[in-house]
Image: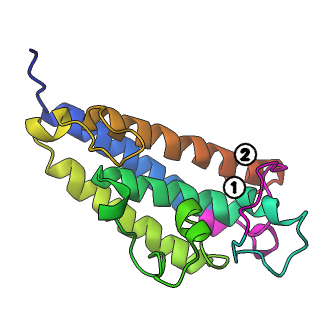
């Protein structure tokens, strides 16, 4: 059996990549004009969960586009990052306020974990800051046992080493950041 070792160079590299990612989210959230906040990045064909209250005021055919709205893609990426950093099973994890799953949510909303409303820029910026702090603390405290431990049953990636989950988490967030940056860039907004 091989022994996994966490060295300072690996932790520093992982920390740098997460930092760059959170900086990118900060820029994208700041750069996105209000007129594009609820604009879809792509046409979504995902079926809308029956009973979900998010977008209830919209026509049924428009509701799936919320899955690809700028704010939703950003929220999803940060929310999944926050969850994966803990590497815990879903029932043991809860996001910070105002993103917590309220007890009065329908079973559909808990299953799909949809926000009850459009998340504001300020709320998302706070969530990015909170998740950045969580990533910094997580990486700083990583031990040999942490990186080698299997992700627990109940997590969608149960059984893989936590080190692999961290790398998948980083890749996932950077993929969504690239989508946000491309969307803004196509409209002449953001980095030159």
Q: Classify the position of the N terminus by image quarter.
A: top left
Q: Please state if 189 lies on the left or on the right of 17 as rendered.
A: right
Residue closest to the eye, 149 or 16: 149
The boundaries of the magenta stretch are 29-50
Asked if residue 27 can be seen in this view, the reply is no
Label 1 – label 2 distance at C-alpha: 9 Å
For disc 1, the neighbor class at 10 Å (few under 14, some 14 to 19, many from 20) is some
What secondary structure is the stretch in magenta mostly built from? Answer: loop
The residue that disc 2 covers is 182
Residue 156 against residue 4 in the figure, above or below? below
Residue 152 in picture, x, y percent from top left:
26, 44
Q: Give yes or no for residue 47 being in the magenta stretch.
A: yes
* Residue located 46% across and 82% down the image: 103
Tell me residue 129's x, y (percent). Answer: 40, 68
Residue 144 showing in the rendered view: yes
Query: Against 88, is 57 above or below?
Result: below
Query: Tag 2's secondary structure?
Result: helix
Q: In this rendering, would 119 be left or right of 183? A: left
Q: Answer above or below: position of 58 versus 60.
A: below
Q: Residue at x 60, y 47 (%)?
A: 176
Residue located beneath label 1 in the image: 190
Residue 132 image offset from top left, x and y in percent: 36, 60
> Which label's residue is closer to the chain start, 1 or 2?
2
In which quadrant of the rendered view does residue 119 lie? Answer: bottom right
Taking the view exactly as shown, the residue that stands out farthest to the bottom is 104
Residue at the spot x=55%, y=79% of the render? 105
């Amino acid at each position: 059996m091989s022994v996994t070792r966490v060295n300072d160079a690996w932790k520093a590299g992982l920390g740098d990549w997460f930092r760059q990612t959170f900086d990118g989210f900060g820029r994208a959230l700041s750069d996105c004009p209000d007129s594009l906040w609820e604009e879809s990045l792509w046409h979504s064909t995902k079926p809308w969960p029956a009973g979900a209250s998010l977008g209830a005021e919209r026509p049924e055919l428009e509701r799936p586009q919320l899955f690809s709205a700028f704010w939703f893609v950003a929220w999803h990426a940060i929310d999944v990052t926050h969850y994966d950093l803990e590497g815990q099973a879903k029932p043991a994890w809860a996001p910070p306020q105002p993103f917590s799953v309220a007890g009065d949510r329908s079973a559909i909303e808990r299953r799909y974990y949809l926000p009850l409303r459009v998340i504001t820029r300020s709320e998302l910026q706070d969530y990015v800051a909170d998740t950045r702090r969580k990533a910094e603390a997580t990486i700083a405290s990583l031990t040999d046992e942490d990186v080698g431990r299997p992700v627990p049953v109940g997590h969608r990636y149960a059984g893989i080493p936590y080190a692999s989950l961290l790398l998948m988490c980083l890749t996932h967030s950077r993929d969504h950041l690239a989508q946000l940056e491309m969307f803004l860039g196509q409209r002449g907004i953001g980095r030159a």
